[in-house]
Amino acid sequence: MNENGHKADLQGVSETLLLPLFSRALESERDRPIVTDAKAVQLIGRIDYDFSRLAKQDLYNTVIALRTQKIDSLLQQALAVQPETLVVTLGCGLDTRFERVHQGSTSWVDIDFTDVISLRRRLLDEEPCRTFVASSILDESWMKSLEGHAPESIVFIAEGVLMYLEEQQVRWLISSLNRRFPGSQLIFTAISPLEVLLSRLHPTVGPMGLRFQWGVSRGREVETWGEGIALLEEWQYCKQSEPRLGLFRLLRHLPPAMRPSKVLSYRLRGPRSSEA
Ligand SMILES: C[S@@+](CC[C@H](N)C(=O)[O-])C[C@H]1O[C@@H](n2cnc3c(N)ncnc32)[C@H](O)[C@@H]1O
């Protein structure tokens, strides 16, 4: 615990931001890390929090490292095609993708609750190309503020976030993005319905007293939520060849509703009427 650091006064779901941050820092200090995140290591040293409370589950850290690497790579592909992309991070926590992936003409809007953005502002710098917004992602006003931007050059990322929302909230969010930003890309992580049922036993959120709320069996299900929502890729951790996954890889033989988390990427084309 760093008692001279910035106090992390985070309640409820906000506190979960420390889990992936701590995982990325631990991963960075391994031999042959899957991802290296020097900023995460630095931030852990500047936050006054008892990190020994967070489970040091090797499998969890590996999964976080793999998802970080996968989303970094999806974003890098998007930036290679469209360098002037606006990256909108939904539920940004202390995400440090900017430090890992930013290119000169890319801009970033990072959105989270007020307590999170207040901590984020104390630890990370806003820049002309990097804005922090204190808002629930379920509040329409941040969407209105982005409406002048060319929608086809926006990439929305929700990493480790949507499982904390109710299904009707996730439906509202994705339908709203689809309607308002036709041509944009949406990347998010999702868990399975079984993981929602078992969330009380989850080694990280369980001890925090939190529960997951939303899970989905297959990425194609989300396509049925609105015309124009098109799955680009469904990427499952248990299908990856990473040796550190060990027996976890056997879960790929289970039915989709029971397989663990995935990274999903969609093109939001918008309802046909909005293309006119
Ligand atoms: C597990 S953390 C993930 C943080 C970050 N995306 C990362 O991967 O490092 C979940 C984050 O979602 C945020 N969050 C959850 N529900 C939210 C909502 N309705 N509006 C804004 N942020 C939300 C929490 O405050 C927290 O920062």
Image (spheres, helix red, strand yellow):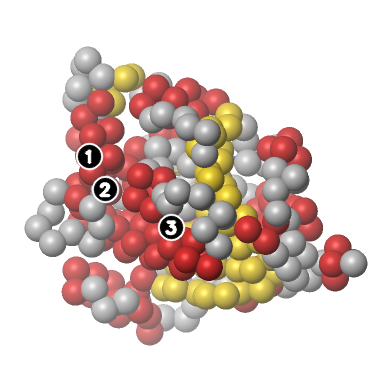
Q: Which residue is drawn at 30% across and 80% down?
A: 250
Task: Determine whether label 1 and label 3 are within 8 Å by CB.
Answer: no
* Ligand 1 has an atom within 8 Å of the beta carbon of the residue at disc 3: no
Nearer the observer, 23 or 98 = 98
Task: Determine whether label 1 and label 2 are within 8 Å by CB.
Answer: yes
Assign a secondary structure to mark 1.
helix
Assign a secondary structure to mark 3.
loop
Tag 2 residue: 37
Tag 3 residue: 198
Q: What amino acid type is highlighted by mark number 2?
A: Asp
- Please give the label number shown on residue 96: none
Q: Which of marks 1 and 3 is in front?
A: 1
- Please give the label number shown on residue 41: 1
Q: Which residue is drawn at 62% across and 32% down?
A: 135
Q: Is residue 220 left or right of residue 258?
A: right
Q: Is residue 109 left or right of residue 249?
A: right
The residues tagged by marks 3 and 2 sit, at their Cα atoms, a distance apart of 30 Å
Q: In this view, does 274 lie to the left or right of 245?
A: right
Q: What amino acid type is highlighted by mark number 3?
A: Leu
Nearer the observer, 29 or 154 = 154
